[in-house]
Amino acid sequence: MELLRVELSGVAAQAETATGSEPYDLGVLGVAVHPKEIDGLEHTVVQMMFDDDRSDFDPSLLECPLVAEVRTPAGDLIARELFDHDAFRRRLHAERQADGDELRGVLVLSDGELPPPYLRLSFLPVPLAATAHTTLSVVRSARNDLIDGVEAGFADGSLTDRQRRDLIVAIEQRHPR
């Protein structure tokens, strides 16, 4: 289920949902995109903002599998990445404080604090400038659908065995059964 679709221009931007629009009615306040260098590589950070104070807000949006996809006007996929969520960030933060290295993910702190639960972040491995004239879609998925998609990509040869393993680990760590 697509939650939001935004046209990108290759520069940092924010988009708020319009009152009465389908994303707004689902509790999506908006999205922001900005550049970030991670391990020496340029990434595009997608930040989803939810209105979790609404009486009709679906709290599963704060932890369910969400995927950010950037596509060309022809529909070709440029980048796809899972969003994090508060429970995962807390586990990752605790592990990093204990000098562990099993969880895979990017941890962003502001003044030493984790982002609030109503923010979800995705770190796309593509420079923001490369997103000019593309479309960002935020899609709600199910864990099994994500794993089935990875297995299909491996079966058709579009994913290597290492990529397959890395994706399965990322899904399992962020969305354990």
Image (cartoon, rainbow, N blue to C red):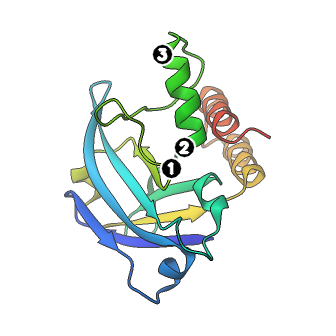
- Name the residue at 21% across, 57% down: 12
Q: For the residues labelled 1 and 2, say whether their Cβ atoms are less than 8 Å apart.
A: yes
Residue 72 figure quarter: bottom left
Mark 1 neighbour density, 10 Å: few (under 14) some (14–19) many (20 or more): some
Q: Amino acid at mark 1?
A: Pro
Which element type, helix, strand or loop, lies under badge 3?
helix
Q: Which mark is residue 86?
A: 2
Q: Residue 55 placed where, x, y %?
A: 60, 75
- Judge by depth and name the residue closer to the eye, 87 or 22: 87
**Residue at the location (50% across, 63% down)?**
138
Q: Residues within 10 Å of mark 2 (few under 14, many from 20)?
A: some
Q: Amino acid at mark 2?
A: Asp
Q: Determine contact: label 3, label 1, CB under 8 Å.
A: no
**Residue 81, image x, y percentages:** 50, 47
Answer yes or no: is residue 136 visible.
Answer: yes
Pointer 3 residue: 97
- Horizontal relation, residue 22 to residue 147: left or right: left
Residue farthest toward the top in the current orientation of the protein: 99
Please tell me whether residue 121 is drawn above or below residue 133 in the rendered image. above
How far separated are the C-alphas under marks 3 and 1? 20 Å
| Residue that carries the numbered disc 1 in the rendered image | 117
For marks 3 and 2, the one nearer the N-term is 2
Question: Which quadrant of the figure contains the N terminus?
Answer: bottom right
Q: Is residue 74 visible?
A: no
Which element carries disc 1, helix, strand or loop?
A: loop
Q: Position of residue 102 (x, y in %)?
A: 60, 18
- How many marks the image carries: the answer is 3
Q: Earlier in the sequence, mark 3 or mark 1?
A: 3
